[in-house]
Amino acid sequence: MADDLKYGYKGAEPTQSFGNNTGVFDPNDINNLIADNKWTTFGQLELIETQTSTNGTSAFNFLNLGSYNVHFVTFTNCKATSAETNMALRFSNNGGTSWIATGYQFAYWFGRNVNPLEQKSTNSAFLGYAGQITSSTVCGGYFYVYNLLDSSKYSFASYQSEATSNTTQYSFGSGVLPTAETHNALQVTMNTDSLVAGAVVSLYGIRYS
Amino acid sequence: MATNLEFIKSASGTSVSSLSVTDCFSAKYDVYTVVGRGDFTNTNAFIYLRFLDSGGSEVSGATDYAYANLVMESYASFGEDRNANADHIQRIVYSNNGNDFSFEINIYNPYDSLSYSFCQWQSGGRSSLGLVGMKSIGVLKQTATMSGIKIYNPTFTDINVSVYGVK
């Protein structure tokens, strides 16, 4: 559209923002406004990537985090190959070339009908644990993850999960890697063992967060 | 039809002692998700929350709110903090001087004039000793339409809050 008829207006053009798009738009206008985060389209939980385990998968590496301040991770149908293990996160500051394996702090509640307990660490190799699983236990849950791409802030996560075996178990908690730096890759992993085929892990970005 | 989080509004501030997100609730949604992150300067401080009524005024009666927190510290035994009659909802976050924080809050029925406004949240902050996580519930014991929220108490170096409708 000619510049003197931007958005169908002659002269001063209307200011565009999410929830407030005014005028007549051609495809280029819409593409440009989407690129500038100014086009109204609902659905701000935006899927970045989904990965599915094969037999023996021990980690899901997400190397593309988009440009979000808050991420959301779901994990479903997670079942251990042989041993008891726990779902957890690790971050990378070099694009996934290596994964930070020290310094995580966490606190979570592990609920079960026998011996429920609190778990904590001020210097762990993992951020978690979210969801305890065995070869006879199926687990699912989620993480909210904050500030990964913000070099001035610590990277936090909060999480919740549920697992079923002979009884139902649940856990919820929070964690942090108290280092203010950019974490540009995210790993969903477990502290030991691996998963059987069929576990699904999805990474979302929450736009405008 | 979208089945997702639908962005409604965000607010941010630097060097402020409170942040209000006004006119973010409507009849379009029953459930809302709020995500926030930031940093504050006070020593050993909590973030509080109050609702804003349909005129935008703070709801602050002495017994209007009730809350219960499980305080999960990475360096000490877990604790509890609760109050059945308070003038605010407490401990959205606990954090200490110069430490960052994050939180997500789910809010139920704030615009429904026939229901109480409930919320549940999880958060992470830091003391000088380590992580402090919260797993919590709260309620505004009024059957009235609410239009927004106010986050307050410490002096925020910076704070960003976004509100989404849950479809």
Image (spheres, helix red, strand yellow):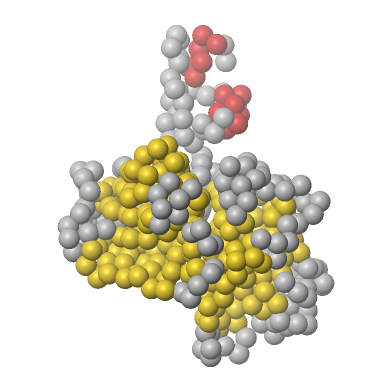
Q: Is residue A78 above or below residue A73?
A: below
Q: Is residue B102 above or below residue B115?
A: above
> x%, y% of residue A197?
77, 72
Q: Is residue B144 above or below residue A196?
A: above
Image label count: 0
**Residue A52 placement, left or right of B56:** right
**Residue B5 placement, left or right of B27:** right
Does residue A176 appear in this view? Answer: yes
Identify the residue at horizontal 60%, vertical 82% (top origin).
A164
Q: Is residue A64 above or below residue B79?
A: above
Identify the residue at horizontal 51%, vertical 50% (top origin).
B100
Q: Quadrant of the N terminus of chain A?
A: top right
Of A22 and A159, which appears nearest the observer?
Answer: A159
**Residue A72 placement, left or right of A56:** left
Residue A77 position by quadrant: bottom right
> x%, y% of residue B110?
30, 56
Residue A69 position by quadrant: top right
Identify the residue at horizontal 42%, vertical 37% (top origin).
B14
> x%, y% of residue A193?
78, 75
Does residue B2 appear in this view? Answer: no
> x%, y% of residue A172?
52, 70
Of A189 and B54, which appears nearest the observer?
Answer: A189
Identify the residue at horizontal 48%, vertical 59% (top origin).
B127
